[in-house]
Image (cartoon, grey):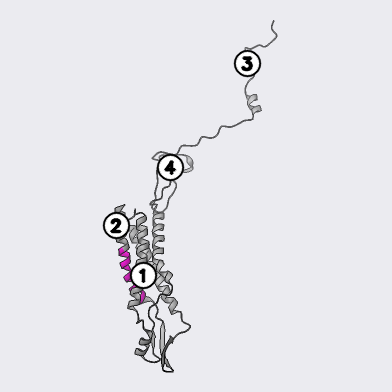
């Protein structure tokens, strides 16, 4: 158990550090939100250059898609490295994915444009379009990495049969690479020829039950037995 906990801690730290790569990709692939500065009554104002654009939604969507992809990749790597890991590894995927998402969020914001939009607008000049700072409006996207990682590791273990036992009355467990199937030696409750291992006991067919009158007719009466005579005593 201690070994699994140590491995889980290492995995969580590695995933958390991998969030830096997610932040770099998010800053690189996310669309920029155009802003423009202007002076009105001697006061600088900043407004959106494309009021009908959906760039801000694309920023959140890019982060979510990247986080989902990182969750799948991390789950596959953990599964290949530690196939028989238990609950600690699943917890490590969830915790590491959340920490990695938080780090990616901060790295993306740090690498993006300046946070002070008024100062930026004054620097570029009046009427000049510039990019808005990176912003993650949908905070639920921070859970995408953990969500996809946990579900992916569950699906991989489910399809590989690890940790899933399927008994068909034979006293033994059969596992398959793609899915669990009923052992060929005990299909239909009857042992197949050439099968190895203990086969499931066959169920005996129930005895035919006849009505009481039919059973009485089937048995010969005492008077009909040869050699017997039941005449008057004499």
Q: Secondary structure at mark 3?
A: loop
**Are the residues tagged 1 and 4 within 8 Å (C-beta)?**
no
**Residue 68 visible at all:** no
Residue 217: x and y in percent read 65, 24
Using residue 163 as the reference point, say whether residue 221 is left or right of it: right
Tag 2 residue: 6
Q: Residue at x 38, y 68 (%)?
A: 67
| Stretch in magenta | 13-27
Mark 4–mark 2 Cα distance, whole angstroms, equals: 42 Å
User: Alpha-carbon distance for marks 1 and 3?
Assistant: 98 Å
Q: Determine whether the residue tagged by mark 4 lies in a helix, strand or loop.
A: helix
Task: Name which quarter of the figure residue 193 lies in.
Answer: top left
Examine the image and state in which quarter residue 18 appears: bottom left
- The image position of residue 45, as x and y in percent, is 42, 89
Give the residue at mark 1. Answer: 102
* Main secondary structure found in the magenta portion: helix
Q: Earlier in the sequence, mark 4 or mark 2?
A: 2
- How many marks the image carries: the answer is 4
Q: Which residue is mark 3?
A: 225
Circle 4 residue = 185
- Nearest to the eye among marks 2 and 3: give it: 2
- Residue 129 in percent (x, y) is at 39, 87
Above or below residue 169? Residue 27 is: below
Query: Quick one: which residue is furthest to the front in this view?
Result: 42
- Is 111 situated above or below 173? below
Residue 12's place in the image compared with 84, above or below, is below
């Amino acid at each position: 158990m201690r070994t699994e906990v140590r491995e889980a801690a290492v995995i969580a730290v590695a995933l958390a550090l991998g969030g830096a790569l997610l932040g770099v990709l998010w800053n690189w692939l996310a669309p920029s939100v155009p802003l423009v500065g202007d002076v009105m009554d001697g006061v600088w104002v900043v407004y959106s250059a494309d009021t009908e654009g959906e760039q801000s939604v694309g920023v959140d969507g890019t982060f979510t898609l990247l986080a989902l992809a990182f969750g799948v990749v991390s789950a596959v790597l953990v599964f290949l490295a530690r196939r028989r890991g238990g609950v600690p590894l699943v917890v490590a995927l969830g915790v590491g994915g959340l920490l990695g998402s938080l780090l990616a969020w901060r790295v993306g914001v740090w690498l993006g444009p300046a946070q002070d939009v008024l100062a930026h607008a004054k620097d570029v000049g009046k009427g000049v379009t510039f990019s808005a700072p990176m912003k993650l409006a949908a905070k639920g996207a921070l859970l995408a990495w953990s969500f996809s990682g946990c579900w992916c590791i569950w699906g991989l273990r489910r399809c590989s049969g690890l940790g899933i036992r399927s008994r068909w009355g034979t006293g033994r467990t059969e596992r398959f690479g793609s899915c669990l199937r009923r052992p060929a030696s005990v299909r239909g409750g009857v042992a197949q020829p050439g099968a190895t291992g203990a086969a499931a006991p066959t169920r005996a067919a129930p005895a035919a039950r006849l009505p009481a009158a039919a059973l009485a007719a089937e048995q010969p009466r005492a008077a009909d037995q040869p050699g017997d005579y039941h005449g008057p005593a004499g």
